[in-house]
Structure formats: C-alpha cells, structure tokens
Image (tube, coloured by chain):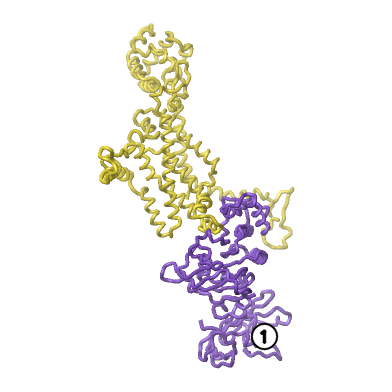
Amino acid sequence: MENENPGEVFVAFDRVQKSYDGEELVVKDLNLAISKGEFLTMLGPSGSGKTTCLMMLAGFETATYGDILLDGKAINNIPPHKRGIGMVFQNYALFPHMTIGENLAFPLEVRGIDKSEREAKVMNALSMVQMESFAGRRPAQLSGGQQQRVALARALVFEPELVLMDEPLGALDKNLREQMQYEIKHLHDQLGITVVYVTHDQTEALTMSDRIAVFDDGRIQQLASPADLYERPENAFVAQFIGENNKMKGKIESKDGDIVTVRLDDGSAVQSLAISAHETDEKTTLSLRPERVFVVKEGQSFSNCFDAKVEELIYLGDHIRSRLSVCGRNDFIMKVPNSSDNHSMRKGQSIRIGWSEQDCRALDAS
Amino acid sequence: MTQIDGTPNGSDNDHKVNGQMVTVDGTPLKASLKRAERKRTLIAFLLVAPLLTYLLISFIFPIGQMMWRSVDNPQLVSVLPKTLEALQDWDGEGIPDEPVFEALAQELTVASANRTIGRVAVRLNYEISAARGALMRTSRSAEDMEPPYKEAFLDAHRLWNETEFYRIIKREGRPLTASYYVAAFDGTYNEDGEIVMQDENRRIYIDLFIRTFSMSLGITLLTLLLGFPISFLMASLPMRKANLLMIFVLLPFWTSLLVRTTSWIVLLQQQGVINELLIFLGVIGEDGRLGMIYNMTGTIIAMTHILLPFMVLPLYSVMKTIPPSYVRAAKSLGATPWTAFWRIYVPQTLPGIGAGAVLVFIISIGYYITPALVGGQSGQMISNLIAYHMQTSLNWGLAAALGSVLLISVLILYWVYNRLVGADSLKLG
C-alpha cells in the first residue's frame, strides 16, 4: 500500500522548522509528501512535534522556516478559514449552544450556501455517520461516541479534500475506540479524501493508516507502511515505540554479508541482520520481537540458541507471556502461543530458546 | 436483589415481606436507610446552623422589621383611641362635633403629661406640615381648656379649622397605613381620600428611582464594555501574566474608599489634573472646564471603577473554561475570525455576562457611599434619600417603604432575568 501514486503529491512539508521561543526547535527540518487520497498518521510520544505539524497545516501555528504546500501552492500566508481543510479535534469542539443540525450547518452557512441545499447536505452528512435522528439535539445530550461521529460529520459536510484529525478517539473507551477506527477507515475509503491523523496510540496507527510517520524529538524517525514499520523498524526508537521489543546492547564482532555477529555485554554471541549498524566494533542495540522467540524442541535448530530460566509466567488467554533470564538479563520477554503442548512450562524451569537471525535486527546504539 | 455479603450464590439474601424490601433482620429497607442517613443529615444541619442563625438574626429579621415598619402605624391608635372612636361618627365634611374635641382635650392632656404627644405630632407632620406645631401648642394648653372644647380648639391653632386635618387624623388612626408607600411613589390623598399624584414640582422619588435604575444600567454596560476585553485577554494569557493583570483588576478592592474617592476628586475636579491637562493641550478653553465630579458623571465614573471587578471575575472564570479549540474549529470550518468570535465565542460567555451584569446592577442599585461623596445633586441615588430619611428627617416609615420598593424591584428584575436566561446558567466563580 506504500504511496500508491507517488507522483500526485497533495500536501508537502518542505524543510519546515518550528520554534516557539527562538531557542529550541520543536520541529526540525521536516520533509513530508502526502499523496491524494492517502491516510497518513503522525505517531509519536507527546512533545514529539506531531501536533505542532498538524496545527501548522491547519494554519493555527505558523512555520518558523520552510514551506507547507497544499496542491502545489504555499499556504503559509493563508489564514485557517480560507484553507478549506476539515478538522476533527480531540475534545470534538462541538458548539455547545447550537443543536447538532446547526453545528453541521455552520460551515455551509458561512460559505453562503442557501437553506434548502444546506439542509440536504446536513442530513446527508449525518446519515454518513448514522446520526440522522439526532439533528435536533444539543451536543451535551450525546454520548462521547455520538459526539465523535457528529464532529466527524461536521468536518466532512463542506466536502473538504483534506481532513485533519487530532487524536479524535483519545477520550473514548477501548471498545468504542476500536469501532470508530473502522468507521473512520471506511469513510476514508468511501469518500476518497486525504486524511492526516495524529495519535500517540500505535494500535490505532497500525489499524487505520496507509503510511505512518513516527515522530520523535521533532523529526520523522521512520515513514513506512504499518507492516514495514512493525517488521522492519529502522532505528531503536521505532522498534521500541511500535509493539513490544527485546532490546539487547552489544558490539559488532564480525560481518558476513547482511549478517553480523554481535557480542553482547555478558559475552554471548548473537547472529543478527545488519540494519543501521554495520561496522566492526560499532556499538549496537539488537531488537527482537517477543513473538519471534521460540522454545527449541527436539530436532529444531535456530541460528541463535540459548539456555534460559523461566522467571515469571502471565496467562493472557491467547498467549502466555513469559519473562526469562537469558544472556545475562532477566527482562527478556517471550510470547508463547496458547496451544495444548505449551502448558508444560513452570516457573523456575530451565528451557532452551532460539530465534532466527532474520528476526533479530542490529540497530543504532541509543 | 439485596445482596450485601457479595457471595454470588447467596440466594437467601433476597428478603421481602409483604412485597416490601427488608434488611436481613427484618426491618423495612426504607426505615433502615433513613436511620443510616439520619446522622449525615444531622451533621449537615449542624454545619450550616451557625451561618443560618447569623443570617436569621442579622439579615432576615431586620429585613422583616424594615418591611413591617413601612406599614406599621401605631402612634395615633395608642395615644388618641377615644378621639378616633368619636371621629368614626364624623361624615368627613366640615368640622367634627363636640364629642371629638372633648375626647381630644382629655387625651392631649394625658399625652402632654406623659410626653407621648411628640410621637403623634411627628407622625402627623409627615402628612401635613405645621401639624407638629399645632399639636404641641394645643396640648400644652389642653389642661386649662373649658367646654365647649370645640371653640377652644378652633382658637388654639389655624389647623383645627381645616377639614383636611381631621381627615388625616381619621385616616392615620388605623394600625396599618399605606401612606408611606403612597409618598414613596410621589402620591398623595385628595379631598375625597383618593390617591393622586403629587404636584409636578413636589415629585422626587419616581424620578429618583428612574435615575437610579438608568445609572445602574449605564454602569453595568460600562463595566461590561471595559471588562470584556480585559477578561478575554486574561483568559488567553499564560497563568503568571494573567495573575499579574488580575492584581490590577482587584486593586480597587484593596484601596481605601477615601483614598480612592480623593484621587477621583483630584483628577476630575474643575481645577483638577484632567481639566488642566485638557487646557494645556488646548482641547478646551479656560472657561470651558468640564464638570466631571459632584454630578452624575462623577458618580458613574467612580462606581464603574469600583464595580469593574464584579464584572471581570465572573467573565474571566467563564472564559477560562472555554477551550481555544471552539474558535479554532469555527475557523477551520470556514468562519472569519469575527464570525468565529461573535457566533461561537460570545454566546459561550453569556453565563459570565449574565452573572456579572446581575451582580453589578444589583450592587449599584443600592450603592450609597460613592454617590454621597462625589455625586453632588444630580448624582444622588435612591439610597442617599433613604439614608436622609433614616438620619436627618427621621421618617423611618418612609425610609422603610423606599427600601422595600428597592428590594422588591430587585427581586422582580431577578425573576425576569431568571425567566429570560435561567439562574442555573449564572456562573459566579
């Protein structure tokens, strides 16, 4: 799904920098091209600069340096109300003194659309989110999920080509959040709009996005499709931020094509895929997903095999999460699928575990 | 299910007797609940009891007293009971007959001896001037009067020759009177005992009420005009700067009233700073000095300054709770900054505007000290006249009636406001 039409750039950040106090950069040299119809998520911890980027795009913050282009035109000097970008806010920002219908009619009204057309469009937008019967209510009479839908409908009712969403599902409970994720995704597919979505929830990002830009420290750490991001993180931050991850520090001892041998701090040697660390004697952090570690059974062989001791077992239904002591560290996590033959593990037991060198990635040392 | 022990299989916990829920030991559930809550109710009551007592003694009771005093009329009833009885037979035309004067002579003699005549004299003087003199003089000689008393009285003072005087005595010889309220609305009684308006040149109170209300309205609008932008600024500034501004806003609260008033006098008087400055700048000539104090302008300027915090505080507290995302949302939906402000921001500040306006208006309607100090003639408000009747003319009945009218009109205004806007939407902090 990666960038299906790379030629048709709709939104572009060109060397954008942002500082609030003139001393520190919140956004450092941001370059990003978003295609028409794409669902791009800006993912990152709080303070990583993702919301600032969204606010610059919406026009509520000005870029300190660089250009933001919309459909090929620089929009730095266009005020927010002339940009024609739909936006969904974290707290929904439904106008409390207006009914749902009036809320939706507002963007049409300020555009001077006449009453009958306005009403048709409002009902159409409400039916898109299955909220037709709520037009006469006030926002305070609606549940969080319903308010969310109305906010979505309001951002879409004036048919913008670009819709920004600033952590729109942050205030909902888990079940509702998952349901809304699918609904937003479906609306995006159905209407063919471009969506820029900001969240700090990686599951949400993985579920909805065509591409994800992982932000940290004012920079994009990696820009890739969800699968690529999870399977092939390019640096230690991304590996740590997306999904669970066993981090092992060591030094590269030798290199054979793509494969490096890494000597860990306790002396054990691990075969690993060289990603961002290649040179002999270079320090590196190995990244290994817990579900790619296996209990070695008779007749099986892995390029990396170690003795381990079971420290803790947590039963999670579909899998068993086990904390092991291995290679001199006791925070090594292995996810064991819940199948009938895996129930034999006991706390304190000594087992042998292994993983493929293809699943273990040698990243930067940080 | 009244499951109280939490065991999932305690099926015998569902107690019902005659269709009524009961606890494990058989007492009705409602009674048990009441007992359990009784202590809490008692504590709640004890917590408010001191304030309640204080308010009853210092607030509710005096207000009741005041309202009672505005209709209470005991003077004539207690001192001249027989005269009043004799006056019942009088038809209200001409001069009453001998029995009235006989009773009057007796009672005036007694009243003069035990010094209760003063109260009656003062009371009647409210209704007709010279009544005090007539009664005091006549009562001193009442002892020596010989029948026929009628002649003696008619000789004693010219008032005794006027039918009007007897009508007044008869009218005010009832334990309750409306005459204070009649006076408070610039009314008077005509020859037939009907209530009519006073002569044009003797009307005071209605004009004063109108002036009080319109000045209060003006002050409310001014504080809103001045308070809205500053509240808006404070709500959008970071906490530290907002607090600094808040100190400036609260300064009038912390300055002594006399210092404040004196500064206004220094600034605004004919030879004051502002006039001198305007003359220096050539805006006005030497003979065009502006009269900005000891008149209505002075009162409005000084009161707006004092009451501004009462507008700013509720406005600020409401504006602080309005997230910036509303205006942003409006802009992102295509509204110009002005439309976003007027259609989205301002309506959400209405509870604050309402609260501030009601506070400022109600406070200024009863304001006394500032108009008294800088108001001169034209800047006087109704409260100054109430104080005058309390302290100078000692007509407490009229003062009480004026006060009651003020109180009731504020209550009516509050009721109207409540019907229009809703008191629940008031946000006072």
- Tell me which corner region of the image, top left, top right, bottom left or bottom right, holds residue A225: bottom right
Give the residue drawn at x 43%, y 36%: B214
Judged left or right of residue B159, residue B408 is: right
In this picture, is A25 found above or below B206? below
Q: Nearer the viewer, residue A16 or A167?
A: A16
Helix, strand or loop at disc 1? Answer: strand
Give the residue drawn at x 51%, y 55%: B336
Q: Circle 1 is placed at which residue position?
A: A295
The percent position of residue B313, horizontal first and vertical second, equals 44, 50
- Tell me which corner region of the image, top left, top right, bottom left or bottom right, holds residue A201: bottom right
In this picture, is A141 found above or below B156? below
The percent position of residue B206, horizontal first and vertical second, equals 43, 29
Q: Residues within 10 Å of mark 1 (few under 14, many from 20)?
A: some
Can residue A265 be seen here? no
Q: Nearer the viewer, residue B75 or A170?
A: A170
- The N terminus of chain B appears in which quarter of the rendering? bottom right
- Tell me which corner region of the image, top left, top right, bottom left or bottom right, holds residue A108: bottom right
The percent position of residue A175, horizontal first and vertical second, equals 66, 65
Judged left or right of residue A177, residue B356 is: left
Give the residue drawn at x 43%, y 18%: B168
Kindly identify the amino acid type of the residue bearing the numbered disc 1. Val
The percent position of residue A104, horizontal first and vertical second, equals 61, 54
Q: How many marks?
A: 1
Q: Nearer the viewer, residue B228 or B362?
A: B228
Give the purple chain's letter.
A
Q: Which chain is home to disc 1?
A: A
Q: Colour of chain B?
A: yellow
Judged left or right of residue A140, residue B353 is: left
